[in-house]
Amino acid sequence: MSEIISLAASVVALAVSIVVAWRQDRQSRSAVDFAAVLEIYLRDVRNKDYQNDMHYVVTRLRSDHPQDGIPVSRLPERERNAVWNVAFLYESIGVMYELGAINRRIALGLFHFRIIQVWEAIVPYVRAEREYRDGPFLAYFEKLYAEAQSSHPSTASRVQGRTVRTHAPGPQV
């Protein structure tokens, strides 16, 4: 009888150890994801130059340079730098996403709208750049875009399994 009790206690201890280790691993991954996102927000997204470049890329680039076949590297310096500044941020997020260094819900939840908006603004220039280079260019960003396209925009309100309110409860003013 004591052997059965000892075995049961060992099984319970093993189960508790597994659950604790799993939770610690999950919390550790969450902390890494948070650190990556925080760095992106503090270093890039909140940067005034980045914000100006983002605004230009999504609102004026196509009207200022409507010709087909212009590679990113052949745009005038200001426009080229704006595209690189914005696109390489999403390329970096795509690389982190692909390597598993950032959680899918975080990558798509926080950046879903901008991923789609930026990619659709620059895709003709990216395609022309690929032809010009005869090779890949912003492939991780494109893959991230495809993931964003295949996910519902409501992903943006779910981060780490929590729903984020998009407006305060109660009467709207």
Image (spheres, helix red, strand yellow):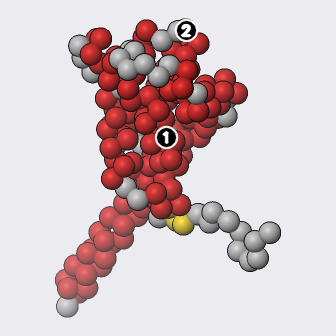
Is label 1 in a helix, a strand or a loop? helix
Residue receiving disc 1: 117
How many discs appear? 2
Q: Residue at x 30, y 11 (%)?
A: 132
Q: Is residue 33 above or below residue 122?
A: below
- Three-letter amino acid code at the position of disc 1: Gln
Q: Residue at x 70, y 27 (%)?
A: 48
Q: What is the x, y in percent for residue 171?
A: 76, 76
Q: Residues within 10 Å of mark 1 (few under 14, many from 20)?
A: some
Q: Are marks 2 and 1 in contact (CB under 8 Å)?
A: no
Q: Is residue 67 above or below residue 44?
A: above
Q: What is the x, y in percent for residue 18?
A: 32, 64
- Three-letter amino acid code at the position of disc 2: Glu
Residue 119 in view in this figure = yes
Asked whether, in this view, residue 89 is left or right of residue 144, the answer is right
Residue receiving disc 2: 77
How far apart in space, not on screen, are marks 2 and 1 (Cα)?
22 Å
